Image (cartoon, rainbow, N blue to C red):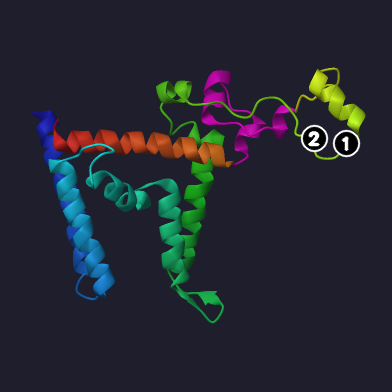
Amino acid sequence: MFVMLSRVLLWLLLGTIIFSVFQKFYPSGNFVGRLFLAVLLIVLLLSFFNPGGSGTVVSPIWQFVSFPLKPLGAAILLMIVAAQRMKAGGIEKPGGFMVGWALTILLIASTPAFAYFLVNPRLAAILPEGQPKQTLVALTNPGDAVGISLGTVRSDVPTFFMQSTPADVSRRGRVALEDFVPNAQTLSQTTTAWEAYLNQVFIFLRGR
C-alpha cells in the first residue's frame, strides 16, 4: 500500500511539473518548441508501454530526450538558456544564476570528493579506477626514455598529480587532497551512477 501511494504521489508530481512546463512554453512557444514538447510526451508514453532495449526506436530517442536530465546535459541546457539573456555584453536576470548553477553542477559531478557521496558504494566498487602510477614523458633525452621503458628509472607520479575517481576514494576509504581536482573521468562515472538512479525511478514508476 505504501509503495502504491508513493508511486501515485510521484506520478502526480511529474504530471504537475509537465503540465506547468506545457502551460508556460506551449502557448507562447514557436513551432520548434511545440514540436519538441509533443515529441517528448510521445516518447514518455512509448517508453512506458515499450521500454525495449538497443533494438527499439524508443531507446535512442529516449537517450536524446533524457540528455538534459544528466549532469552535463543539465549544465549545457542552463548555459544555452543563459546565453539567450545576453544583451550589450551583460547577462540579464536570471541568466547569471543559471550560469552559476551550471558551473556548480559540473563542479560537483566532476570532483571525486563530491561525486563519491553521489555514487553508490557497490557501484563505485566495479567502476574503473583512476590513472595508473606512470609518467608520460614529453621532453627527455633518449637515455632516460630507455631507462623508463626498462624500469631502471623511477617514473612514479606523486598522488597529487594523478586524476582520482570515486572508485579510488572508495578503495582508499578516505578523501585526500587530490580528490578535489575535477576531471572528465569522474564526470563520466557520476553520469553512469545518475543513469542508474534514473533507471530505478523509471522502473518504480512503471511498477514492473
Asked if disc 1 and disc 2 are in contact, CB closer than 8 Å, the reply is yes
Question: Looking at the image, which residue is at 53% across and 46% down?
Answer: 107
Question: In the figure, is residue 144 to the left or right of 107?
Answer: right
Nearer to us in this view, 58 or 25: 58
Q: Nearer the viewer, residue 111 or 47?
A: 47
Label 1 SS: loop
172 horizontally vs 105: left or right: right
> Measured along the vertical axis of the image, is residue 67 above or below residue 93?
above
Dividing the picture into quadrants, the one containing residue 164 is top right
Q: Quarter-wise, where is residue 199 in the image?
A: top left
Q: Name the element at disc 2.
A: loop
Residue type for callout 1: Thr
Reading the image, the residue beneath label 2 is 137
Q: CA distance from mark 1 to mark 2?
A: 7 Å
> 84 above or below 77?
below
Quadrant in which the N terminus is drawn: top left
| 151 or 185, nearer to the observer | 151
| Residue depicted at x 47% and y 21% | 125
- Tell me, yes or no, whether the highlighted magenta stretch contains residue 88: no
Residue 120, image x and y in percent?
41, 27
Span of residues in magenta: 158-182
Tell me the tag on residue 140. 1
Would you call the spot at circle 2 few (<14 residues within 10 Å), some (14-19), or many (20 or more)? few
The location of residue 56, given as percent across then percent down, is: 23, 42
> From what the image shows, is residue 59 above or below residue 97?
above
Which residue is depicted at the point 17% across and 38% down?
A: 205
Determine crowd level at label 1: few under 14, some 14-19, many 20+ residues with C-alpha closer than 10 A.
few
Amino acid type of the residue tagged 2 in the rendering: Val
- Tell me what residue is drawn at x 75 percent, y 30 percent: 135
